Image (spheres, rainbow, N blue to C red):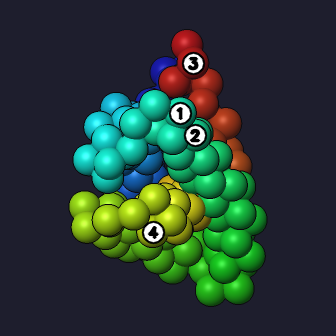
Amino acid sequence: MSKTYHSPFNIAVLAAGLGFFIDAFDLFLFNVYRIPSLKDLGLSGDDLRIAGEKLLAIQMAGMMIGGILSGIIADKKGRVTALFGSIILYSLCNIANGFVHDVNTYAIIRFLAGVGLAGELGAGITLVGESMSPEKRDTELFWLLH
């Protein structure tokens, strides 16, 4: 009896995968440009370090809260709504980042971007899991790992 291989890729997997890539890319770019952007705001020395650490901590807090909020929204409004809502949120926040003129506004925007980043990841993973039958998930996981 021959084994048939079913592709694990569908629209949910593609959307979640692209979303995860964008999440990782955003975090990478923020870490690369955090210091130069704070220097452009006129910070230096200890103020630069303190503000950079503050921004990173605030974004991580946003990600913690975003994971919880997106789960609640996904349960009440649906996974797709939560997924695309979070994508819109962090996309708008990343555009807004280009227009900040002070650290406090920067922090608020990075917090909201963190909410969107975590929301996309949680909703995307759940949507992928729900888009496949348990049998298909098990079979595809087996083929992906072997």
The kind of secondary structure element at disc 2 is helix
Q: Amino acid at mark 1?
A: Asp
Q: Which residue is mark 4?
A: 105
Q: Which mark is residue 67?
A: none
Q: Residue at x 40, y 52 (%)?
A: 19
Q: Earlier in the sequence, mark 2 or mark 4?
A: 2
Going from N to C along the chain, the mark reached first, 3 or 4, is 4
Q: Which circle's residue, 3 or 2, is located before the other in the chain? A: 2
Residue 145 is tagged as: 3
Q: Left or right? Give the position of 32 relative to 99.
A: right
Q: How far apart are the two marked residues, 3 and 1, measured between alpha carbons?
A: 47 Å
Q: Tell me: residue 27, above or below residue 99.
A: above
> In this view of the protein, can residue 2 be seen by the observer?
yes
| Dot in front, 3 or 2 | 2
Q: Are marks 3 and 1 in contact (CB under 8 Å)?
A: no
The residue under label 2 is 50
